Amino acid sequence: MKNIYSFIVLFICCACFSVNAQNVQLIIKNIDGSSEIKDVVLAKQSDGAMRLVIPAKDITKGVKYIDIQHPNFIANVGDNGYWLGNRGQLGYFKYNKGIWTTNIYNNYHLIPIQAFKTDKGMFLAWIKGLRFEAESRVVSRENRYYMTFRIRVEEMGFDAYEDAVIDYYNLGKNAQYSEVGRFFRNKRLSMGEIIPLTEKMKKLPNVKYQADTFVTRLHVFASKPRVPGDQTPETEPDVKVFMTTKQAEDIMQAFKNAGIDKMEFCCAGWTTGGYDGRFPSLFPVEELIGGEAGFKKMIEKAKSLGYTIACHTANTGAYKISPMWSEDYICKKPNGSLLRGETYWAGGNTYRVCLERAWQLFVPKELKQVKDLGVNGSHYIDVFTAISPYPCFDKNHATNRKQSAEAQRKIAQFCIDNLHGFSSECGEDHLINELTYINYVSADIKRWQGYNFIDKKLKNFDTILPLKRPKNSKTLIDNIVPLWEIVYHGFVYHNADRITQRHTTAWNKRISKKLPLVLVEFGARPIFYTNSLKNVNQIAKAYREYKPLAYLSTVFMDFHKIINENVRLIGYADGSRIVINYGNQPFYFEGVDIPPISYKLLRASAK
């Protein structure tokens, strides 16, 4: 009864929250079930921000979480405006019930901001302290919307290692989501916090090489079937070969014959046991695909054709079948037990690796062995930018999430210094300065649409393009816009989403003719996965189609506008604009005819 009463009081207090924008409300939920509410005065900063600081000493272990509610991040159902998530999730104030949170998928913050648009202005919240312990939340209940940051104190596991800090900005009544992205980007740029690709390429030739091409993943050379449980030498499934090094050479030659002059290849499944087979062990190169001799010969073939080539490795997961297995470098839970990964892969049950301990024990040595193979492309480490850094509670090498992020940064920098660059999976921005490219920004579009590539009964994806809320959806999301791209296009090469990979292959063409337009709308470059000659012509087609747009890969994206139901306008910092027509009828823009299901690039001179 006490808990019910607490929540009623909590709700009434939130509903009656003062409109004084100089204050925020801390809604504190304790582990014992009790709750309390505190009003905190914000401090004005020299740049106009209103800053919240919760001192680390005041964040005690008896707290379960702290919700931070700013009065400008509250709206009524039916109000004008929208909330804006960190991947560009956009929701209008029209649903009476629902929750959106970044905590569903590894608590990631692609960018550490949230925004709220009302008739009063466009309000931006930027979490600067304890960002790895926070989630972004939107709750709709009883005809009201509330957007908050939640500091998950109990899950931190350690004493707070820094103050919680949030800066709040009012960007003005006329600002939209494009202004949010530009403001955040320009703010970070002016403070010297982020490095554009044009600067990265001065030190890394591979960054310059990739400016007018994309990545094809030679995926996979070999793998084992996924079976739950820990594997032993007696129970380990057989490794199956999908592509030998000789076959990979043939694919590269076919690329050249098809007119593909430049390509970055990334080799996946070359390691001992195949793809995800015996990590953290990388070597010896899987003998069934051709062994180290064949692998080195293939690398030299790629270089002789004018291509760059790199290896896919992983550091976050380990398997008991690994010859290097040791509980020493496995993350521990607070109770001392081993920290499991999210699922099982080809190596069996996966266990989280303490990256600081792995750095001390073996990571530099293994990466030096990769260097000795003769690669000349940007080294790829799986997962680093796909999930938020995680803690380790081993008393011998305890690391909080921020320290884990620093360990990632050390490993990434080692790749930059020794392996022509560092690349990874997704768009978590704590490693944005180290990255050359990412496979895709996130899987948010795919998840939002409830879409599964494994499903053999695929419906026509064109029915939801341009992107729109799925029918019968219970989500609060009405659209996803390229907010991340407005911030970071020109800082890292990227694809938009899991759903936009391999966009011209026969498999994807069966479900969508419009999917290539999503790449253009989000400023993305193609990425392909192949172990077969049958995809070469389709990849060559994508290469030709991408060439006219490639110059924009290092230019900042400045705005994105929804012209009408079927038309989008994207603008770049050099004055280039792209008009995209998803519709089945022609569209005329400033005297230019844009045919159905197509786009037109308007260079700056044509503006």
Image (spheres, rainbow, N blue to C red):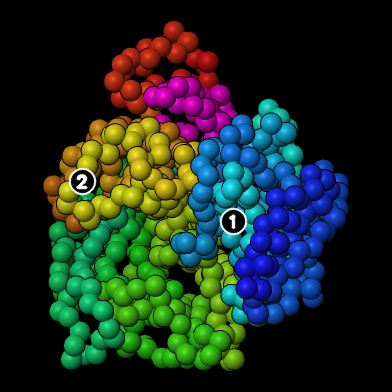
In this orientation, which residue lies closer to the viewer: 78 or 322? 78
Q: Which residue is mark 2?
A: 458
Q: Is residue 565 covered in magenta?
A: yes
Residue neighbourhood size for the residue with mark 1, other residues' Cα within 10 Å, grouped as few (<14), some (14–19), many (≥20)? many
Q: Secondary structure at mark 2?
A: loop
Q: Which residue corresponds to mark 1?
A: 136
**Image coordinates for residue 90, horizontal then vertical, percent:** 52, 41
Residue 507 as seen in the image, left or right of residue 189:
left
Q: Identify the residue at horizontal 62%, vertical 54% (top origin).
A: 112
604 to 147, vertically: above or below: above
Give x and y (percent) for residue 549.
41, 31
Please give the name of the residue rendered at 52% of the width and 53% of the height, measured from the top-left corner: 99
Q: Is residue 55 left or right of residue 376?
A: right
Q: Is residue 308 magenta?
A: no
Magenta span of residues: 549-578
x 29%, y 20%: residue: 584
Give the structural element (helix, strand or loop) at label 1: strand
Identify the amino acid type marked 2: Leu
Residue extending furthest top? 591
**139 relative to 361 in the view: left or right:** right
Q: Residue furthest front?
A: 1
Rendered residue at 69%/41% (across/down):
123
Image quarter in which the N terminus is found: bottom right
What's the residue type where badge 1 is placed? Ser
Question: Looking at the image, which is closer to me, 64 or 363?
Answer: 64
